[in-house]
Image (tube, rainbow, N blue to C red):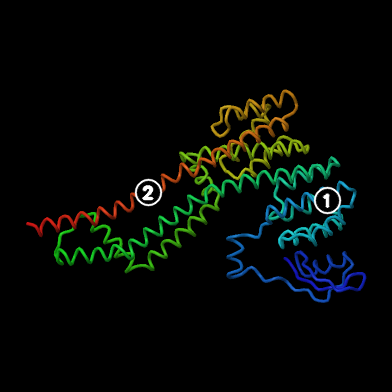
Amino acid sequence: MIFDYRATNKNGNEVTGTVEASNRAGAIESLAKQKMRPISLKEKGSDSGINSFVKNMFGSKVKTNSLVIFTRQLATMVGAGVPLLRALNSLKDHANDAALTAAVNAVAIDVQSGMPLADAMEKHPNAFNEVYVNMVRAGEAAGILDEILNRLAQQQEKSATIKKKVKGAMTYPAILLVITILAFFGLMIFVIPQIGKILTDLGGPDVELPILTRIMLGISSFMINYWYIVLIGIVGTFFGTSRFLRTKDGRRLFHRLLLRAPILKNIVIKVSVARFSRTFASLMGAGVSVVESLRVTGKAIGNVMYEETIENSITEIKNGKQLSETLAGSPLFPDIVSQMLAVGEETGKTDTVLIKVADFYEEEVDVVLESLSSIIEPIMIVIMGSMVGLIAASVMGPIASIAQNVKG
């Protein structure tokens, strides 16, 4: 629970802010630990109705750029010898992200009470994911927290760059798809009824129309007369699909389809391998064990099929196999990955080798994404052209037939 507070600090000055606690008493206790006396304490709006719907649909995750800036600033302050608690309290006031501010504020309170930084961050998965927490935990254990935080910031920047490029490459095809759908509805609702009326006027009410024309007119009539059913169907399909994709079976089916799609398969594999290589290398470089690094990396990739493959690898590694052996021959990992892993295992520089693999596949992703628009654009044009051609055929056929009858 998050509470808005108005309180006086140890100097007697009035301050305002937010504090996260399990209940009101916990919030008061947290303020007391910071030597503040609450004047007013108000719980933020409950997650019900529209607020709950919006939160469930869009979440309240921290922006990647804000987290990268926070991580780099924290690394600099810790490296400069600033006490951790002081650094956290300083940074929470300069974050331009409300969700991050609330999370850092709660982390600072837990750290002040004696909790390790990683454990405090683990309580806020919307701000600090499992990769982040595990690397911080390893950094604390090894006494190299500033170095680990710098690695984290670099890894986040790389991941954000790939994500941004993928979204950018998919924007144009998405716009074309939306235009195609809108054009279809526009033709069915406004154009086809008028054409049907013209055909009836030309051929009379008993005119025999081709089956294609009758189908198009039937679809148009249904959409106009039963628009509410169409609307409910579209909305129901959207939310039903969205809900299904949030289940494990739904995500598994969706990810399997992505890995079989002719164009998308190549992109998904390259992005996933790049993410696997960089995340696993970062965790290994931070001193996290192989099994724990693999477990966290599997979840961080964001693809159920890869997660299952990595879980199987963990089982085989526990039975004495090397990671390179478990991934060899997998359709999800190109041969170069297992070959480079084998080199890393022999030389003891697995993290260094995997960073090179990540760099290679990130460059490959750039090349594929640059050509994506040139591949998808003609496909979308063919789809739009086919739709227009279908409608034209359903119209021109009966007009030609009526014209021949008139001549006859």
User: Which secondary structure, mark 2?
Assistant: helix
- Locate residue 62 relative to residue 225 in the image: left or right: right
Left or right of residue 196: residue 58: right
> Residue sitting at 33 percent across and 52 percent down?
387
Pair 2/1: label in front? 2
Q: How many marks?
A: 2
The N terminus: image quadrant: bottom right
The picture quadrant where one finds residue 367 is top right
Q: List x then y, in percent, for residue 83.
A: 89, 52
Q: Nearer the viewer, residue 256 or 292?
A: 256
- The C terminus, quarter of image: bottom left
Q: Is tag 2's residue or tag 1's residue first in the polypeptide sequence?
A: 1
Judging depth in this view, the residue of 70 and 269 nearest the camera is: 70
Mark 1 surroundings within 10 Å by alpha-carbon count, few (fewer than 14), some (14 through 19), many (20 or more): some
Q: Secondary structure at mark 1?
A: loop
Write down the quadrant of residue 395 in the picture: bottom left
Return the residue found at the far bottom.
Answer: 39
Q: Which residue appears farthest toward the front when viewing the image?
A: 407
The residue closer to the viewer here, 53 or 384, is: 384
Q: Residue at x 79, y 43 (%)?
A: 148
Residue 334: % across, % down: 57, 30
Q: Which residue is mark 2?
A: 383
Asked where in the image residue 137 lies, by quadrant, the reply is: top right
Q: Residue at x 25, y 52 (%)?
A: 393
Residue that mark 1 sits on: 116
**Where does the image place residue 5, in percent across and percent down from the top left?**
79, 72
Q: CA distance from mark 2 to mark 1?
A: 57 Å
The x, y position of residue 216, in whole percent, is: 27, 58
Q: Amino acid at mark 2?
A: Ile
Mark 2: few/some/many CA within 10 Å (<14, 14-19, 20+): some
Q: Amino acid at mark 1?
A: Pro
Residue at the extreme right of the image, as rendered:
11
